[in-house]
Each structure stands twice: as structure tokens, then as C-alpha cells.
């Protein structure tokens, strides 16, 4: 089919909404009305016909296909970004562990106990000169690197948990969206909101997020 004119489709839909609302206000026991009778009731038949012409089955299928392609693209990009983040995290952890091990090796085997001058800043912003043994400094640095590695490992685990939770929520919300209209009618708004609320609570629980009020 030809390329979809999104602007024309939007304008037609916006014009058709008041006409549909007017149509729904008609008494349900009325017999089948002619176009002229509908116009007499204030129904914009031209707007309804224009929307019907633009939003035919081919247009709907094309929009659904485009939506599916976009979802697949977003999913692939999410996976790509997640893979990059995990790879970078693993490299940082591996390099951090190597640095910590090297510092301990130097402290234990290759660095003597000479002292060297260092300058630090206290809570008041005053610089203080003092001496520290090279071995002590190496061990202190190794401990700092260990803490960084632990923080990276914790962040890596948290990213995986949130990613799984986000994926579950996205799939659940897609299911809710697909069931909003069923059997020719609309699911009650309360049912949709309750389903969305349950999906959010399950996702938050899976991610370890405490919901306010619980």
C-alpha cells in the first residue's frame, strides 16, 4: 500500500471523535437512520466517512506492522546497550581485581618499607603533610580498589535485576494493551487500571523496589 499520511489520519480521527460521540448519544431504540436524519441529529457524516476511508483495514495492518518493527528495534537496542554495559562492567571488575592483586604483590614482595611524604586535606580544607610507609600506602590502595570492585559487582547484579523486571513489565503491559478491546467491545477502565497496577506491583517486587504505603 502507499505510504501512510499520518497528519491526515490524525486530523480525520480528531474530526471523527465529536461525530462518534454525537452518534453514541442517539437513542438506542432508534431504527436505522439515513444519512440525512443523522445530519439532522448533528452527526458529522462527512467526518465519519473521511476517517473510515483513511483508516481502512490496510492502514490498520500497516500501523500494526510498523509498531511491531519499532518494538523489535527498541528491544534489540535495549539488548545491545545491556550487553555493552555488562561487558564494560566485567572489564572494570577484572582490571580492578588485577590492580588490587598487583598492589598487594608489590607490598609483600617488591616494595621496601621506606616512607614518603604525602599531602592530604582535612575536613576544614587544611592541607596536612605527613609520611606513610610505601607498603601501607599500597595496601590502602588495594583496599580501595576492592571496594570499587565490590560496588561494580553489586551494580552489575542490580542492572540485571532491573532489566529482567523491565522486560516483564513491558510484556505484561503489551498484553494489557492487546486486550483493551475484545469481543467487539471495550474492557472496563477499572479492569484496565487494576491490571496495570498489578503489573507495576509485580515488576517493582521483582526489582526489590518497596512501594510507598506498603
Image: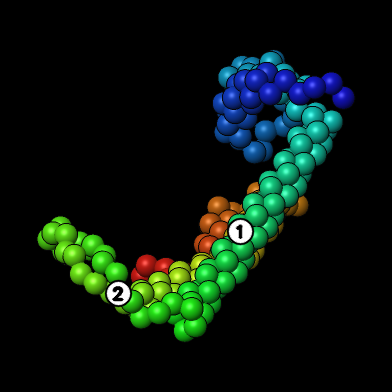
Instruction: Give the residue at mark 1.
Output: 88
Residue 208 can be seen in this image: no
Check disc 2 and report the residue beneath it: 115
Q: List x then y, in percent, for residue 155.
A: 51, 67
Q: Quadrant of the C terminus?
A: bottom left
In the depicted structure, whether residue 186 falls above or below residue 106 = above
Query: Few, some or many C-alpha atoms within 10 Å of disc 1 (few <14, some 14-19, many ≥20)?
Result: few
| Separation (CA) of disc 1 from disc 2 | 36 Å
Q: Position of residue 97 (x, y in %)?
A: 55, 73
Residue pictured at 73% horizontal, 50% vertical:
76
Residue 26 image position (x, y, % from top left): 60, 32
Task: From the viewer's side, name the closer residue of 103 and 34.
Answer: 103
Instruction: Give the mark nearest the N terminus, 1 or 2.
Output: 1
Q: Secondary structure at mark 2?
A: strand
Assign the N terminus to one quadrant of the image. Answer: top right
Q: Quadrant of residue 90?
A: bottom right
Q: Residue furthest right?
A: 1
Q: Residue at x 49, y 83 (%)?
A: 109
**193 versus 59 height, above or below:** below
Can I make out residue 118 in this image? yes
Amino acid at each position: 500500500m502507499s505510504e501512510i499520511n499520518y497528519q491526515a489520519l490524525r486530523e480525520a480521527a480528531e474530526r471523527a471523535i465529536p461525530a462518534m460521540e454525537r452518534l453514541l448519544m442517539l437513542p438506542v431504540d432508534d431504527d436505522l437512520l439515513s444519512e440525512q436524519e443523522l445530519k439532522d441529529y448533528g452527526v458529522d457524516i462527512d467526518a465519519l466517512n473521511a476517517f473510515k476511508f483513511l483508516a481502512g483495514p490496510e492502514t490498520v495492518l500497516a500501523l500494526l506492522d510498523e509498531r511491531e518493527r519499532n518494538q523489535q528495534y527498541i528491544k534489540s537496542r535495549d539488548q545491545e546497550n545491556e550487553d555493552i554495559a555488562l561487558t564494560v562492567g566485567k572489564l572494570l571488575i577484572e582490571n580492578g581485581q588485577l590492580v588490587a592483586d598487583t598492589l598487594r604483590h608489590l607490598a609483600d614482595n617488591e616494595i621496601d618499607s621506606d616512607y614518603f611524604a604525602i599531602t592530604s586535606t582535612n575536613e576544614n580544607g587544611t592541607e596536612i603533610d605527613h609520611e606513610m610507609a610505601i607498603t601501607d600506602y599500597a595496601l590502602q590502595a588495594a583496599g580501595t580498589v576492592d571496594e570499587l570492585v565490590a560496588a561494580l559487582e553489586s551494580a552489575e547484579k542490580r542492572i540485571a535485576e532491573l532489566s529482567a523486571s523491565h522486560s516483564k513489565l513491558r510484556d505484561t503491559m503489551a498484553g494489557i494493551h492487546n486486550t483493551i478491546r475484545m469481543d467487539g467491545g471495550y474492557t472496563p477502565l477499572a479492569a484496565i487500571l487494576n491490571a496495570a497496577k498489578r503489573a507495576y506491583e509485580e515488576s517493582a517486587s521483582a526489582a526489590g523496589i518497596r512501594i510507598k504505603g506498603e
